[in-house]
Image (cartoon, rainbow, N blue to C red):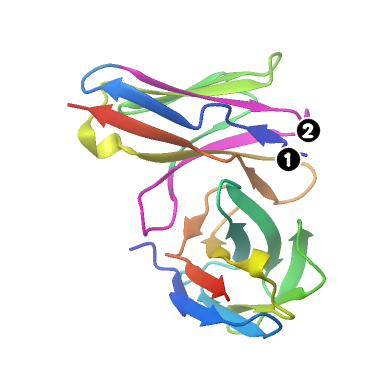
Amino acid sequence: DSGVTQTPKHLITATGQRVTLRCSPRSGDLSVYWYQQSLDQGLQFLIQYYNGEERAKGNILERFSAQQFPDLHSELNLSSLELGDSALYFCASSPHTGELFFGEGSRLTVL
Amino acid sequence: DQQVKQNSPSLSVQEGRISILNCDYTNSMFDYFLWYKKYPAEGPTFLISISSIKDKNEDGRFTVFLNKSAKHLSLHIVPSQPGDSAVYFCAASALVIDDKIIFGKGTRLHILP
């Protein structure tokens, strides 16, 4: 158990819909990262927050947004969903730069 | 543009032998490198890391080698055990720039009995 909690574990929705994925980092970790894992694509970096502020941005689509709240939990919002958004979405937290502790992921299926 | 490349999608190694997983990178600003291991239905877990000021780091059965001039790193597992069967991800970061950590696509390691 990494100490990082992601909800929901599984989500099935339709194209055009909007979903929110939630992440609770390990106690004391200020940094939260979001990654997308599609088939054969490895872990694609989406975005990183540190203590409530956006720190680094990767290949995150404009239809996606994220935020980190004062209690340090984070949410990833995915809107106008397309079939290609079906993937595993991982959240990770970090006490310092470098080592990431990953949650078990949220599997999103868009039908 | 894949900045971190793991060109072998899979690798099979006999139990007890050495497993060597390779990783290449293109961004010369990367100064910190990590290896993660992932079992099915679980998130990746940290294995070992190396800073660009070193060329080798060892932790038990796991050793990471870094060749900066070739922009290449490798993970050696000696001896390989059945529990090592998993997907291994190479990752890199340019700490002088930001905290972004870029992952490769992974190599699936099969340890054969």
> Residue B89: image x %, image y %?
51, 40
Q: Are marks 2 and 1 in contact (CB under 8 Å)?
A: yes
> Residue B36: image x %, image y %?
46, 42
Circle 2 sits on which residue? B29
Front residue (pair B3, B67): B3
Chain of the residue where label 1 is placed in the rendered structure: B
The answer to whether any part of residue B101 appears in the image is: yes
Residue at image point 78% right, 66% down: A61
Query: What SS does tag 2 mark?
Result: loop
Spatial separation of the CA atoms under disc 2 and disc 1: 5 Å
> Residue B60: image x %, image y %?
31, 28
Amino acid type indicated by mark 2: Met
Amino acid type indicated by mark 1: Ala
Residue at image point 54% right, 59% down: A95
Which residues fall within the magenta stretch? B18-46
> Residue B88: image x %, image y %?
45, 38
